[in-house]
């Protein structure tokens, strides 16, 4: 009797352990997934980690088409931006390959490719497999923004540029032309400032990436740089101080509360007709086009950020996990999601397409006026910082910029403090 | 000579009999205690161990270097650490104090409601049931200087805005941004405080009140000398829970101000989040967490000790 009980318990334990082992094993590709180099039709499942934006949401609506064409099941994990970047880092660090395809920005490459070495280079595929990602349809500047160490690690999806948005009706009424230089922009803002009905401009003044991206364009416009040729920070220069002072000047013609404005609040402020000009990220275009939330439909236009300097690039792309268990399917998805056919269908809703064939198409430009300005801006859009300490650096600098904006530091003090903080961060990271 | 001592065995059995109740209780909670020790103990030990390293989660190639108390010293020398600690303390003191006063008032009022009390409690509890991040976002937009409803009325009343008592942007000025965080926390958690205090009020015996009435005590005297002393246990529980929560405040700050302007509203928890989840400087983040947890435990222990002293004196 006791022996029977023991055997029964042992059998039950083995059965449970077998079930647990089976449940824990991943079976995305139906057994051993073929590596891209051995060929084979992509199949199975992949997991796609992403954060919601209007363009992403519209692309996801088209997903059933891809699944029907290829038979590949795409499991979408759509979460908040901050949580997404954390999950990506955790997954890449742990090398579990939980997410096959995910959101990559140019500023992430130093960490994902440089430190973690966990992104799959995509530019080798067309050569070895005949897979055509249409790389020649990307501008060299754009391809460079998603490259690291000489390889392309993500295929661009949204070409998020910093554009100067302006009210065409107010400009026409005031007899002004779209600003071509920084001085013209500052002058236009002062002329059009008539609070409280309409302020001259807004500032993305929130501590963190918003104020950093707002400010860096002014720095470059004034001839300054974040680093010198030997990668030493150059924040305590006259150009950096001037850029900060220009920001403070613009803030006088901005609505109260801009010190807490992030990019969506900046776009809302423009869409509500509260300001006459604004420097916005181009992925906010959908909010300007939507008549249910925008009071300026048909009354606005983009022009590239004034001047001929570099402007900050904030676009994102789809990268492949180097530890993905289904690389053929992941590659097939990336190819589809970044193809000209799919990207063209996203344009009517206000996307910022990365492909030259779409940006430079005269028919599309006539129908969607913002494309021409974006095409022009695309050639000088660069990733501002390509350093693994990106978040530390932005955190430190943005705190000082925000302090200057709120009056607790002068422009000179803010830049001096930021300089010493950057030196400390970079020396401890070395 | 017998091989065992009758007297000793007898005294041992008597000891067991005296402590049987306690031993029975311990036996029942032992599995849960072992489980909790394993589940909580391992992470705590892991945390303590790695707080002594210099390491970056996103840079495995750099490895982990044992630096002893280096992270702790770096924090104690860091201006941002002290600023975040001061901010957390300020929010805690003001928020919990206001929540207690308002919560007690709401609880006393609810106790007098005889018809529809349950419905009223459910309605009053709505803020506490909302996700903190949603609460933060909601208040952020309501306090927006340009189109926020609350900001509009505050400006009209000359409390904020140009020419107001507190000129400048509400969430863009350090003082008003901090006050906004406190008020949002009060809005969200006063109902929770009221619920605990109401439960305490409802469990109070009636006899002392009858005796007070016979002695001719006024309403205030009844409240101060009868209600409050008897409510001490519920007050302790409510304060402890809120203090522990307030020391970890993150969601509201993150969604309202992201720690700005210029780190004026950056709490200790947000600072830990920045170090741990943006910079991935795990050694430093763990040290920060240990310091915050130690402070929380110390505060709670002091409250417990004070309550125990007062109970002993009574």
Image: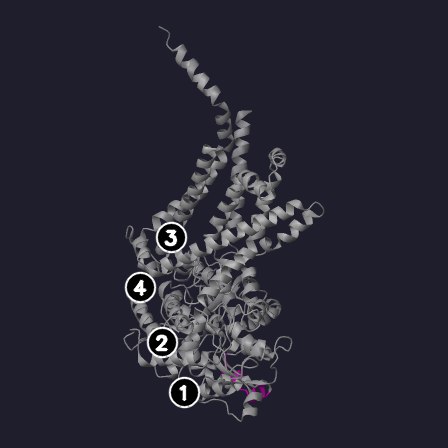
* Depicted B191 relative to depicted B159: above or below: above
- Give the number of the mark in front: 2 or 3: 2
Highlighted range, magenta? A354-366
Is A359 covered by the magenta stretch? yes
Cβ–Cβ under 8 Å for marks 3 and 4 = no
Disc ID at residue A38? none
Dot 1: what SS?
Answer: loop
**Measured Cα–Cα span from mark 2 to mark 3:** 34 Å
Q: Quadrant of residue B156?
A: bottom right
Dot 2: what SS?
Answer: helix
- Give the number of the mark in front: 4 or 2: 2
Disc ID at residue A411? 2
Say if labels 3 and 4 share a chain: no
Disc ID at residue A429? 4
Residue A123: image location, x then y, percent: 43, 73
* Depicted A149 relative to depicted A35: above or below: below
**Measured Cα–Cα span from mark 4 to mark 2:** 27 Å
Residue A350 appears in the figure: no
**Circle 3 is placed at which residue position?**
B286
**Circle 1 is placed at which residue position?**
A308
* Depicted A71 relative to depicted A96: above or below: below
For the N terminus of chain A, give its image quadrant: top right
Cβ–Cβ under 8 Å for marks 3 and 1 = no
- Give the number of the mark in front: 1 or 2: 2
**Residue farthest toward the front in the current orientation of the protein:** B216
Name the subunit of mark 2.
A
Residue A386: image location, x then y, percent: 37, 72
Q: Which is the main secondary structure of the residues drawn in magenta?
A: helix
Horizontal side of B154 relative to A422 (left or right) equals right
Q: Earlier in the sequence, mark 4 or mark 1?
A: 1
Q: Which residue is more in the foreground, A364 or B28? A: B28
């Amino acid at each position: 009797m006791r022996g029977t009980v023991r055997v029964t318990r042992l059998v039950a334990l083995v059965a449970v352990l077998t079930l647990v082992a089976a449940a824990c094993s991943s079976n995305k590709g139906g057994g051993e997934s073929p590596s891209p180099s051995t060929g084979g039709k992509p199949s199975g499942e992949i997991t796609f980690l992403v954060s919601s934006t209007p363009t992403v949401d519209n692309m996801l609506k088209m997903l059933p088409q891809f699944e029907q064409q290829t038979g590949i099941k795409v499991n979408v994990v759509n979460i908040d931006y901050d949580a997404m970047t954390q999950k990506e880092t955790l997954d890449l660090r742990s090398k579990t390959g939980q997410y096959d395809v995910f959101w990559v920005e140019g500023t992430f490459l130093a960490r994902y490719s440089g430190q973690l070495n966990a992104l799959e280079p995509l530019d080798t595929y067309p050569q070895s497999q005949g897979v055509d990602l249409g790389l020649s349809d990307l501008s060299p500047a754009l391809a460079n923004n998603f490259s690291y160490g000489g390889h392309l690690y993500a295929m661009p999806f949204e070409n998020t540029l910093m554009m100067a948005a302006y009210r065409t009706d107010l400009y026409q009424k005031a007899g002004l032309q779209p600003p071509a230089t920084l001085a013209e922009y500052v002058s236009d803002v002062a002329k059009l400032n008539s609070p409280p009905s309409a302020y001259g401009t807004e500032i993305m003044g929130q501590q963190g990436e918003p104020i950093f991206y707002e400010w860096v364009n002014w720095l470059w416009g004034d001839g300054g740089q974040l680093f010198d040729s030997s990668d030493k920070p150059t924040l305590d220069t006259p150009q950096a101080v001037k850029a900060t002072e220009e920001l403070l000047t613009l803030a006088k013609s901005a609505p109260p509360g801009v010190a807490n404005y992030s990019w969506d609040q900046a776009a809302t402020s423009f869409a509500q007709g509260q300001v006459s000009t604004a420097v916005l990220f181009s992925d906010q275009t959908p909010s300007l086009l939507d008549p249910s939330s925008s009071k300026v439909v048909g009354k606005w236009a983009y022009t590239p950020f004034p001047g001929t300097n570099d402007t900050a690039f904030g676009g994102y792309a789809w990268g492949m996990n180097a530890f993905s268990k289904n690389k053929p399917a992941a590659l097939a998805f990336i190819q589809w999601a970044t193809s000209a056919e799919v990207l063209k269908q996203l344009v009517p809703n206000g996307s910022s397409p990365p492909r030259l064939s779409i940006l430079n198409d005269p028919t599309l430009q006539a129908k969607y006026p913002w494309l021409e300005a974006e095409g022009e801006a695309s050639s000088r859009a660069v990733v501002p910082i390509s350093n693994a300490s990106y978040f530390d650096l932005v955190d430190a600098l943005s705190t000082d910029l925000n302090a200057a904006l709120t009056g607790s530091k002068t422009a000179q003090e803010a830049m001096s403090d930021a300089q010493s903080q950057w030196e400390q961060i970079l020396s401890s990271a070395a | 000579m017998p091989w065992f001592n009758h007297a000793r065995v007898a005294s041992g059995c008597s000891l067991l009999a005296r402590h049987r109740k306690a031993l029975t209780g311990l036996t029942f909670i032992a599995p849960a205690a072992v489980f909790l020790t394993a589940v909580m103990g391992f992470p705590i030990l892991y945390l303590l161990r790695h707080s002594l390293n210099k390491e970056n989660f996103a840079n495995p190639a750099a490895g982990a270097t044992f630096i002893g108390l280096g992270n702790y010293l770096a924090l104690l020398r860091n201006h941002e650490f002290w600023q975040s600690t001061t901010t957390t303390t300020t929010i805690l003191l003001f928020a919990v104090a206001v929540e207690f006063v308002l919560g007690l008032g709401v609880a006393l009022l609810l106790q007098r409601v005889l018809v529809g009390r349950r419905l009223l409690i459910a309605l009053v509890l709505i803020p506490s049931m909302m996700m903190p991040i949603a609460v933060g976002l909601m208040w952020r937009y309501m306090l927006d200087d340009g189109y926020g409803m609350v900001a509009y009325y505050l400006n009209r009343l000359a409390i904020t805005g140009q020419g107001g008592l507190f000129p400048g942007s509400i969430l863009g000025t350090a003082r008003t941004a901090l006050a906004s965080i406190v008020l949002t926390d009060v809005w969200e958690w006063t109902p929770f405080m009221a619920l605990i205090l109401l439960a305490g009020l409802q469990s109070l015996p009636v006899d002392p009140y009858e005796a007070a009435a016979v002695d001719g005590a006024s309403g205030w005297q009844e409240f101060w000398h009868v209600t409050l002393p008897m409510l001490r246990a519920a007050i302790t529980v409510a304060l402890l829970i809120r203090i522990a929560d307030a020391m970890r405040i993150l969601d509201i700050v993150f969604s309202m101000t992201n720690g700005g302007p210029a780190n004026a509203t950056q709490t200790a928890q947000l600072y830990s989040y920045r170090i741990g989840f943006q910079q991935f400087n795990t050694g430093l983040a763990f040290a920060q967490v240990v310091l915050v947890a130690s402070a929380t435990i110390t505060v709670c222990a002091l409250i417990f000790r004070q309550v125990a002293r007062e109970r002993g004196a009574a």
